[in-house]
Image: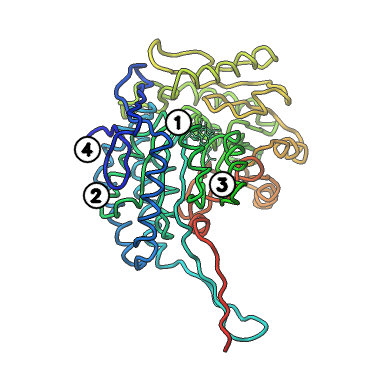
Amino acid sequence: MKLPGQLYVDGAYREAASGARTSLINPATEAEFTTVSAAGTADVEAAVASAQRAWEGGWRDLAPGKRAEILYRIARLLRDYVEHIAEFEMLQIGKPIADARDEAGLGARVFEYYAGAISQFGGQTLPVARGGFDFTLRQSMGVVAAIVPWNFPFPIACWKVAPALAAGNCVVLKPASLSPLTALALGEIAHAAGLPAGVLQVLPGSGSVVGDALVSHPLIRKVSFTGSTEVGRHIMGLAAKDIKRVSLELGGKSPNIVFADADWQKAADNSPMSVFANTGQDCCARSRVYVERSVYEPFVERFVGATQKLIVGDPTHTETQLGPMVSAGQRASVEAYLDDARKTGATIACGGGRPLAKGYYLSPTVLLNAGADSKCWREEIFGPVVAITPFDDEAAMLRDVNASPYGLSGSIWTQNLSRALRVSRAVQSGVLSVNSHSSVHVEAPFGGFKTSGLGRDLGMSAMEGYTELKNVYVAE
Ligand code: TAP
C-alpha cells in the first residue's frame, strides 16, 4: 500500500478542490516526509452529498447480513495490512512500532465485534397499557461526522466508523491534521473490501474549516467527536442550532489510588506505563497518583525506579516503549507545565528534560509535593508527567479526586473487596479498573462523566448512539 496523499471521496482518491496541501513531519526526526491534500468547504459539500446519496441509495436498506459480511471483510483486510497501518502511524505521530501494530490489530477487532453485533441488535416489543402491539425500531440516522484526534488516530477512527456503519449510517471521517494517513488507509481498505463508494469518506483538513463545516452542515445528523474539552464544548454549541446528536470523548485527569493493603509493589511496577504509555498523550493517563501514607515512600522509590528503566527512543525499534511527543508545540506546552511546577514548589524526582538531541522527546517525569491547587495537579497535561501524593483519609482523598472537572477513568489498588466496591461507586468517572489499569475493552462502554464527555464509544452502547429510537403502536 502506498503512502496516502489525497482526500478519499466517493470511493477514490482526489485532490482538494483548492489544491491545498499540508506537510507531515516525522516527530522522531523533525523532518517533513510527505504532504497530504487539505480539504476545504467545497470538499465537505461534495463528501456529504455523496454520503447522503450512498445512504439513500442502498446502505440504509441493505440486509443486515450483507452489512455484516462487508464489515467482516474489512476486518480481514485490515489484518492483512497491519504492517502498513502500523508504519503510517509510526511515521506521522512517532508511535513505537510495537504499539502501532497492536493498535492496528485492535482496529480490525473493532470491525469484527460490530460485524457480529449487527445480528444481535434490534428493538423491543412492549406490553402497553391499552393493548394492541407496540414495538421499537432502531433506525439509522443518515450521515455521521466522525472527528478524531492524533493520539490514537487509527483505533479511535475504527471505534466510530465501525458501529456507525454497522447501524446503517454513512460516515464522513475527519482525522486530525497531524495524523491523516491511517484514516485514509481505512477508507481505501474499506472500499477494497466491498464497502460501496460514498459510504465512508475521509477528509483531512483543518479543524476550524472542515470540522466546523461538517458540524454545521444540515445533512449531518450526528457528530461523534474525540478530542479536547474546549473543542468539544465548541462543537456542542454549533450542534445546538439543529439539535444534532453529539457524542463527545474529551479530556481527563485520571486518578490512580493505591491503598496500603494492596499489592503495592505490583501497582508501583505497573503504574508508570499507565501514565507514560503513548508518551503520556492519553486521555486515560493515570496522571494523579494517591498513595496511602504508610506505603508512600517505598511506593515512590519503586515507581521512580520502574520509570527510569523505561526505554525511550527510536520508534522503529521493537523494544522502544516511549517515542517522541507528537509535535514541538505539544512538547512546549508540557514544558510550560514543568516550569510552573518548579516555580510552585513541586520536586522533580526523575525526568524533566530532553533525553535526545533530535526529535520531540521528553523524559518521563515524576513530580512530588505538587500543591493541591497547582496546575500540574489539577489540569490535563497530555504528556509524560505524573504527580504522586500521599493520603491519610479515604473520604478526604475521594473529595480531592472528585473535585476535578474531569471524570474519564481511574484505577483502584486494594485487596479489600468492600473497599474496592465502595470506592468504585464513589469515584465520579465513566471507566474504572481495580488492581489493573485496563480501560479499553471493545465489548464495554467507554466514555466520561462531567467535562470528560457525553455518550459512549465501544460496546453495544456506541451502536445505539448511532441510531434513532422509534416506537410503533399497532391497534389490534
Ligand atoms: P483537539 O484540538 O480537540 O482536536 C481533535 C480533533 O478536532 C482534530 O481532528 C481537530 O482538527 C478537530 N478540531 C479542532 N478544532 C475544531 C473545530 N473548531 N471544529 C471541529 N473540529 C475541530 O484535540 P487534540 O489536541 O487533537 O487531542 C488532545 C485532546 O483530546 C486531549 O484533551 C485528550 O484528552 C483528548 N482525547 C480524548 C480522548 C477520549 S476517548 N476521551 C481520546 C483521545 C484524546 P485539527 O487537527 O485539524 O485541529
Q: Residue at x 41, y 13 (%)?
A: 356
* Label 3 with label 1: CB-CB less than 8 Å: no
Front residue (pair 232, 447)? 232
Q: Which mark is residue 1?
A: 4
* Quarter the N terminus occupies: top left
Residue 103 appears left or right of 422: left
SS under mark 3: loop
Identify residue for label 1.
Answer: 206
Q: Is residue 413 visible?
A: no
* Label 2 with label 1: CB-CB less than 8 Å: no
Identify residue for label 2.
Answer: 192
Front residue (pair 336, 6)? 6
The amino acid on which the numbered mark 3 sits, given as a three-letter code, is Gly
> Would you say the beta carbon of the disc 1 residue lies within 8 angstroms of ligand 1?
yes
Q: Earlier in the sequence, mark 4 or mark 1?
A: 4
Q: Determine the CA span between mark 4 and mark 2.
A: 12 Å
> Would you say the beta carbon of the disc 4 residue lies within 8 angstroms of ligand 1?
no
